[in-house]
Amino acid sequence: MRPEYDFSGAVRGTTARRYAEGANVVVVAPDLLDVFPDAKSVDDALRALAPMLRRASSS
């Protein structure tokens, strides 16, 4: 670890359960942050798009 990292306030294991359930991190491009400011907005857009993509891939 780099010396500038400060973990003095960290709590061990707080994300372990969520990570074990499966995690996938996606970084949104800076030019899209006004449209997708948080995970919910990305999830909502992908859920709206998913049925069309599923139909297209099955044909």
Image (tube, rainbow, N blue to C red):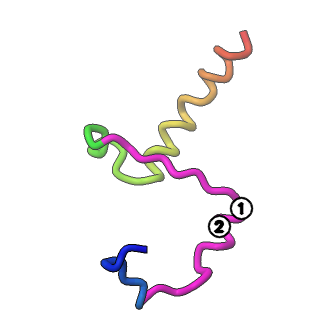
Which quadrant would residue 16 be assigned to in this image? bottom right
As drawn, which residue projects farthest toward the bottom? Answer: 8
Stretch in magenta: 9-29
SS for callout 2:
helix
Residue in view at x 34 percent, y 79 percent? 3
Return the mark for residue 21: 1
Mark 2: which amino acid? Arg
Question: Circles 1 and 2: CB distance less than 8 Å?
Answer: yes
SS for callout 1:
helix
Residue 39, given in percent of the width and then of the height, sits at 46, 53
> Could you tell whether 41 is left or right of 16 in the image?
left
Return the mark for residue 18: 2
> Could you tell whether 47 is left or right of 35 in the image?
right
Residue 54, given in percent of the width and then of the height, sits at 67, 23
Residue in view at x 48 percent, y 37 percent? 45
Query: Is residue 28 magenta-colored?
Result: yes
Q: From the viewer's side, name the closer residue of 13 and 50.
A: 13
- Location of the N terminus by quadrant is bottom left
